[in-house]
Image: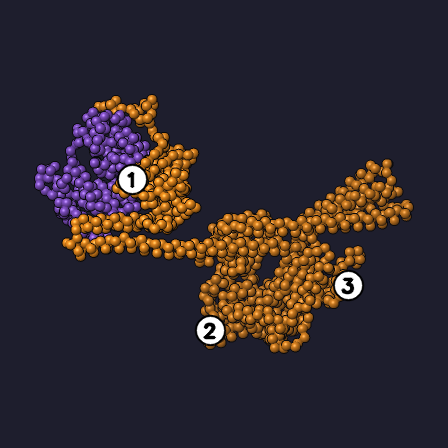
Chain colours: A orange, B purple
Amino acid sequence: MRQRDPKRDPEALLAQLRQAQARESQGKLKIFFGAAAGVGKTYAMLVEAHERKRAGADVVAGVVETHGRAETAALLEGLETVPLHEVEYRGTVLREFGLDAALARRPGLLLLDELAHTNAPGSRHAKRWQDVEELLIAGIDVYTTLNVQHVESLWDAVAEITGVHVRETVPDSIIDRADEIEIVDLPVDDLLQRLREGKVYIAPQIESAIQNFFRKDNLIALRELALRRTAERVDAQMEPYRRMHERHRATAGGRLLVCIGKPATAPKLVRAARRMAASLRVPWTALYVERPGRSQGSPKDEEYISDVLSFAEELGADTAILSGLRISDEILAYARERNASRIVVGKPSRPRWKEMLFGSLANSLIRESQDIDVYVIRGDVGEERESPKAGPEPSPQGRAYGRAIATVAVCSAVAWLMRPYFELSNLIMVYLLGVIVVAVGSGRGPAIVASVLSVAAFDFFFVPPFLTFAVSDTQYLVTFAVMLAAALVLSTMASRLREQTRGARDRERRAAALYKLSRDLADRQDVDELLGRAVETVEDIFASRAVILVPDANARVGVRAGDASLLGPGGHDHGVAQWVFDRGEWAGLGTHTLPGAQALFIPLKGSHGAAGVLGIRPANVRTLLRPDQFALLETCASQTALALERAELAAQAERSRVQIEAERLRNTLLSSVSHDLRTPLAAITGATSSLLEEGGALAPETRRELVESIGEEAARLNRLVGNLLDMSRLESGALKVQKEWHSLEEVIGAALERLGSRLDGRSVDVRLPDGLGLVPLDDVLIQQVVYNLVENALKYTPAGSPIEVRADSAPGEVWVEVADRGPGLPPGEEQRVFEKFYRLREANRPGGIGLGLTIARGIVEAHGGTMTAGNRPEGGAWFRFSLPVPGEPPRLEPEPGEAGADATGGAGVADHRG
Amino acid sequence: MSPTIAAERGEPHPALVLVVEDEAQILRFLRAALTSHGFRYVEATSGEEGLRQAATRAPDVIVLDLGLPDLDGLEVTRRLREWSTVPIVVLSARGQERDKITALDAGADDYVTKPFAVGELMARLRVALRRAFRQGEDPGGEALEVGNLRIDRTRRLVFRDGEEVRLTPIEYKLLVTLAQYPGRVLTHGQLLREVWGPGHVQQTHYLRVYMAQLRHKLERDPARPRYFVTEPGVGYRLREE
C-alpha cells in the first residue's frame, strides 16, 4: 500500500490550516540565536524591544541577565519588570521568573532571557522553555535568547567539537515552533577580542572549563552549527509552502524509523535519526521492541527506554513500542505497515562470538529488509550522560544465578550417589534436567551458566581422572560438546517458553484490568458510584492510591471520589490538579511540570475536553511511568472520562425529560385550572350581578337560592385552591412529614369533622378494631388523605349511598380503607385514578380538578406507605392506603395509683377523693 | 344568645370588638357582620395601630389577623400580653398550624381559619368573651356541665346522661382541664403542662392515649366525637352544644 501523496493530501492541508488557526490565538515567539555567549543576543533583544515599545507595544521584562554590563543595563531602563518569584529551597531563597505574576499582568510582549535555563526546584515547571510555552498559550508574545550548544539535537555535535557536555538543553520542538529566529552573529575574531576585553560574562566556577571552549576553532565550528541550524529551520518552514505550490516535486520518500536497542547508544541514535530526518524532510518514528516477559527483569532499562522515547518525542518523533519475540520481524512489519523507507539501527557492540551465536539485529535487518534502506550508525563514545549505572545491590538476577549454581551442585550430589549403579550417560541426563529446571525457573542467562557449569562439574567429578578438569580419553570431548550443545538448546527453548507464558500472562492481566474497568463503568449512571468504582479499579491495577476531581459550574475542580489526602497537606496540590484540568496535560509527581506534587495528575479527557482530573500516587512512580503502564494508565483515564461523560449526558437527558414532562403538566394544569377556576367564578359573578341589579324584583326564595349558590361556589373555589397549594407543596418538596405517634381513630374523626355538613344524608360507617395502637404519622397530612378519599367518594357516588371507613393492622404496617357503593372504577384504570388531573370521563362531571387522589397518594408515599384502589365484588370502589409501623409505640408510664389488676384504665376516681 | 355581656354583668353595655386586619374586603364584611350581631366595632389596619387602639379604646375582645403588613400578628399578641389580658381571636390560613400553636402559646385565646363563616367567628368571640367575664372567679366549687356530661368537682365524679362513669385520675384531670375552657382550643403543650406537668410537654403520645380513653368512656361514637374535637396539628377543644 502507498501513502497518499502528501502534497495533495487534503488532511494535511486541513491540519496545516488548523495549526495556523491555533497559532493565531497564541503569542508569537522570537528567539535571538547565537553561536556562543557574548555575541550580543541580550543586547539585540533589548534594542528590538525598545523599538517595539516605541511602536506602541506593551513591553515588559521578565528576566533579563545584564551580567553587570553597563550598556545592556542602560537598555533595561524604562522597561517595566515583572517581580521575581521567590522559591524556598533547602533553607535558601532562590529568585525565579514570576510566571504567575507575568500571566496576571498579561503584557503584549515579554522579554525572557536564557531559554535553556533550569528553574529552581519547587517552581511550576522544571525548565524555562516550559514557562515560555505557557506564556505563548496565554497569548503573550515572548522574546528570548538561546545559544547553539543548548539545542537538544546538536548536543552531541557540540560535545564532540568542544569536549564540553552541556547540561541544560532545549528541545528542538520549541525552536521549530518559534515564529521568528534572529541569528545574532559576530565574527569569531571580534568575539575573541570582546572576550579578552572582559566583555563576555563567564561564571567564575566554570572559568577553567571555558578556556577550552572559547578556542578559535571551536567558535568557528559552533558558528557554523548555529547558521546551519537556522538554515535548516528556514528550509523546514519553506516545506509546507513548497508542498502547496510545487505540485510536481518528487518526494524524498517515506518515513524514517529508528530502532532503540541498547540503552547506552539510544540517545545518540535518536539525535542522529533526527538530523537525518530533518535533512531528508521526512517524518520519523522512534521504535522500541520489547521481548515479552523480559520487561520484569530490568526495570532500570525500561525506565531508561521510556526516557529515551520521550526524548525522541521532544525532538519531534512519533514513538511506538512493539512486542514480539523476533525483533527484526517486528521492525520490518511495522516499517511496511507505516510505509517507512529507511531504518536506522545502532552498530552492534557485542563481541564477535556472541554475534555468531545469537545473530545480530543489524544483520538480520539488512538481510530481510528488501526495498527498505538500513542505516547502521556507530553507537559509542562520550555517552556517559544519564546512562543508567548498574546498581551494586544484588538484584533478583543475582539471586537467579546463585540458584543456577546451587542447582548444579545438587545435580552433582545426586549424580555422585547414582554413580555406582548407573552409566555415565545417565548421569548426564541428571545435569540436563537441572538445566531445564533453571531455564524454566530463572530464565536464559542463569540457564547458560548452569549449562557450562554442568559440563565442568561432569568433567571434574565423573570423567577420569577424577577431581581434575583434565581428560584422559579424548572421546569425552565429544561428550562434552554434545552435552553443552544440548544444554544450551534446551535452556534457550525452555526460557523462551517461559518468556512467552509470562508475556501472555502480562498481556492478559492488562486486558483483564481494562475489561474490568470498562465493565464496571459501563452501566453506572450515578456519578459518585461510577467515580468510586474508577478509583477502586485504578488503585487495584496500579497498586496505588487515587483520587478523582471533577469541575463545578465555574470549572474549578474539587475532589469527588477517592483519597483527598493525595492533594497534599491542606489541599496544597489542588492548584496542580486545576492546572492539569485547565491545560489538559499531565503534571505532578514524575513529570517535568510541578514535579514536587504529592501525586501524578492526569486529565480525564473525554470527547469534549477534560471531564476531570485523576490523581494517582503509586508506591513507586517510576514503575508507573514505564511505557506499558503509562499507556494502560492513559487508557484507564480515558475510559473513566468517557463513562463520566456518558453519565452526565444521561443525567442531562433525564433532566430534559423531566423538564418536558413538567412542561406538559403545566400546560394540562393551566387549561384545567383555568376552566375549573372560571366555572365557580362565573357562577358567583352571575349570582351577585343578579342580586345587585334586580334585587328588589326577585322573589325571596330565588334570592336565597342565588346566595346559596354563591356560598357553594366559593367553598368549591376554596377547595380547589387548597388542592393546588397542597400539590405544589408536594411537588416542590416543601411538604415536610412530621411523624408523631397518633391514634388513627382520632385522625379519621378529624377528617370527618372537617367534612361537616357535606356528610349530611350519608351514612359513614367507621370500623376500627379495639386493639389498634398508635401509628407514627403526620396528623395534619393523613387527616387530609382521609378527607380527600371520603370527599372523592362523596363526589362520585349517588347522594345517600353509604360510605365505609375501615382500618386494621398487619405485621409492620396499618392500613386504612375507604369504600363506597358507587359505580366503581372503570376496569383497568384502577391505578390511573391517582394520576394528576385524572377524572372519570362521564357526562355529569362533578366539580374538582382531579388532584385529590394524587395528593393523597403523594402524602402516603411521603410517609413511606403505599396507596391502591380497586372495585368491590359487590359493587363500588375501594381506596386503601397502608403506613409502615416500625417498632413499638413509646411506653406509657403506668398511672400512679392505677392497679395492675385493672389495666383497662377503670380505676375509680372515688378512691382519690379529698 | 346575645353578644352583649349585659346579661352576665348586669349592665346594658354591648361588647366592643377591635378588628386588626389589613384586607379591606375582609374588614368590610366583618364590619357588617359584627354590627348586625350587636357588637360595637373599631378597626385597625396595621399592628402598630392595633396596639394603640387596644390601649386607648380598651376593647372587650380583639380579632387579630396573623399576616399584617408591619408587625407580625404573633408579635402583636406578645406585646399585648405584656400588659393586657383582653381575649384575642386570631385569623389564620390553613396550613399554618405552627403559627396557630405559636399564637396560642403566646397568649391568644382561639383561632379561626380563613376562609370562615360568620357563625363560626361569632361562636369563638362568645367563648372568648365568656372567659374574660369569668376571669378571677374560681369555678372550683361548681359542677361543670357540657351537653349530657356533668362533672361534680367537689366529689370528683363524672356523669354521662346521669350515670356515673369511672375515670382514672389523669383522665379526670384532662377532662376537667378541657371543661374549664369549654369551646376553646387548648394546644397539646398547654394540656400536657396542665395535666402532666411542665416536664412532659414533648410527650404528645400520652395525650393521644388518654384522649382516646376519654372518648371511649364518654362519647357515643368515639370515631365521630361530639365533645372531644381534634384540631389536627394544634390541639383539642371541648365542644359545647
Q: How many marks?
A: 3
Image height of B48 relative to A195, above or below: above
Residue lying at 18% horizontally and 45% vertically, measured from the top left = B62
Cα–Cα gap, marks 1 and 2: 93 Å
Residue A693 is drawn in which quadrant?
bottom left
Residue lying at 55% horizontally and 69% vertically, measured from the top left = A18
Amino acid type shown at disc 3: Arg
Q: Secondary structure at mark 1?
A: loop
Q: Chain of mark 1?
A: A
Q: Is residue A812 left or right of residue A416?
A: left
Q: Can residue A620 be seen in this snapshot?
A: no
Q: Chain of mark 2?
A: A
The mark closer to the camera, 2 or 3, is: 3
Residue A199 is drawn in which quadrant?
bottom right
Same-chain status of marks 1 and 3: yes
For marks 1 and 2, the one nearer the N-term is 2
Q: Which residue is mark 3?
A: A367
Query: Measured from the top left, where is residue A103 in percent x and y?
Result: 47, 64
Q: Chain of mark 3?
A: A
Q: Which residue is mark 1?
A: A762
Point out the image quarter for the C terminus of chain B. Answer: top left
For marks 1 and 3, the one nearer the N-term is 3
Cα–Cα gap, marks 1 and 3: 108 Å
Q: Which residue is mark 2?
A: A57
Q: Nearer the viewer, residue A701 or B158?
A: A701
Q: Secondary structure at mark 2?
A: loop
Amino acid type shown at disc 1: Arg
